[in-house]
Image: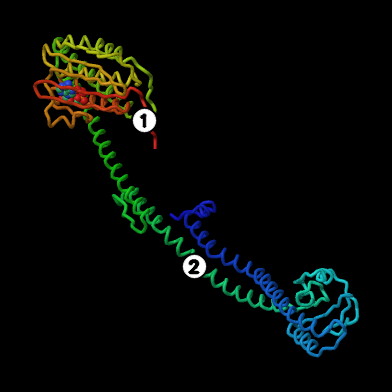
Amino acid sequence: MKKKFNLKDFFHSFRTRIAVLVLLVGVVPCTVFVVSFSSLYEKQSVNSDVNDLVEKGQILNKQIVSSGYLNQQESELVDNQLEVLSTSLSGRIMVVDNTLTIVKDTYNADEGKTIIWGNVVSTFQNKTTSLYDDENDYLVVTVPIKSDGDDDVLGVLVMNKTMSYIDTNLEFFQSLSIIMCLILYIIVIVLAMFTSNRFTRPFYKFCDLIEEVEKGASQEVVVFDDFTETKEVSEKMNSFLNRMRVVDESRQEFVSNVSHELKTPLTSMKVLADSLNGQEDVPVELYREFMLDIGEEIERETKIINDLLSMVKMDKAATTLNISPVNMNELIELILKRLKPIAEKQHVEVVLESFRPVTAEIDEVKFTLAITNLVENGIKYNKEGGWVHVSLNSDHQYCYIKVEDSGMGIPQESLDHIFERFYRVDKSHSREIGGTGLGLAIVKSAVSMHNGDIKVHSVEGEGTMFDVRLPLNYIAKEVR
Ligand code: ADP
């Protein structure tokens, strides 16, 4: 199904952002250049014209002074030069003497008149001035007329230049730049579309493949090596999918194990009940015997359910831990006291050896269950007159609990499996003594939850030792 267009998604999309970025990178510098070029060009042209006029004025200055032009002396050479210059400037030149009288005007309009203008007056103070009128397109430069090596200003040369060429040039430049910019904008838009599509294509392909995995049409996504990042993401995705597969398989196995385990006592009860129901005149003794068996099966079913519930609790996130400082010596003593009747029934001696007072930050309920399971196993899988030795020790960082027994031991090939759910070395024997195969899985979860670790050493026929190491201070793992 095609997705509905959403404006917010559109602006948040990677594709739009790349396109906008490319557009900005292409369009902004070009536009800034075109806009700023006009004013830069105008400024630069005026500056260069001012310098040019000052230079020309200085050349004329010498001839005006040497010809005595300011003192009413005729000079055809100066007149000619003034005319030539004013023609080349498409403007007007005036020569003003020290009484502010215009002695020469190339427009022949104001000769003999007095000029009172700030720039002319300033020039008599030995200053060169310039005025640019961009509205009317003219530039006026005034240059002092003075003798060589003398600072006395004898007169002022007023040069007026028409600047309409700036507008003409700018108009040409602007029409050219509009065409160039249009071409550039088209190129940039095409480039923006191409690059945004190129960069986002792997992500869309990736989404399609994930959809296929979701539908079950594929087991894993193809590794995209278009870019290093996409390659990394697809590889990570595959390892995640593999992990999910393993989790799913183990979940399925667990469900089938649970169903099997729960069904076994029910099947036995059904057989017992059927055989009673199928017989007429059943003797009371037989009833009693079968009912005892049914009772045992119910007890077994209850134990499996209780163990399952404990395990579910252990499987929950570590945030459900109820951590507090606990006196470990007292805790273990209490556990052993509770297990004493079972031990006595089995004629197994249980001994506690505490090397020092130990306080650790633990979830008392969950950790009690773990130690209880270990000691209970030591008793269950022991022989008549055997022993279980529990020791407690610590250093500045860890607490060490050892549960050692003189029991039947565990075969080497089973050692790697005993912490798996429902694993039992000898199914029938374990069942006989009320094992569910969940005890050590619960122990392992509880120890891991406390960031501890557990090791097992065993020699068949001699005994087993479980070694638990637990940090004294609980540090919650970072949730990522
Ligand atoms: P169960 O409920 O069957 O005891 P556990 O998970 O506690 O399940 O133990 C798994 C298996 O490991 C047991 O069935 C038993 O065969 C073996 N095992 C555990 N503890 C001991 C021990 N102390 N001595 C010998 N075998 C043990």
Residue 180 picture location, percent across and down: 57, 74
Based on the displayed image, in which of its 4 quarters is residue 101 positioned? bottom right
Side of 475 relative to 24 (left or right): left
Figure check: 250 above or below 98: above
Find ligand 1 in the image and state its quadrant: top left
Based on the displayed image, in which of its 4 quarters is residue 351 positioned? top left
Pick the residue in front: 192 or 74: 74
The quadrant of the image that shows the N terminus is: bottom left
Amino acid carrying label 2: it is Val
Q: Residues within 10 Å of mark 1 (few under 14, many from 20)?
A: few
The residue depicted at 75 percent of the width and 84 percent of the height is: 85
- Dot 1 corresponds to which residue? 317
The local secondary structure at tag 2 comes to: helix
Amino acid carrying label 1: it is Ala
Residue 57 picture location, percent across and down: 75, 79
- Dot 2 corresponds to which residue? 190
Q: CA distance from mark 2 to mark 1?
A: 52 Å
Based on the displayed image, in which of its 4 quarters is residue 467 positioned? top left
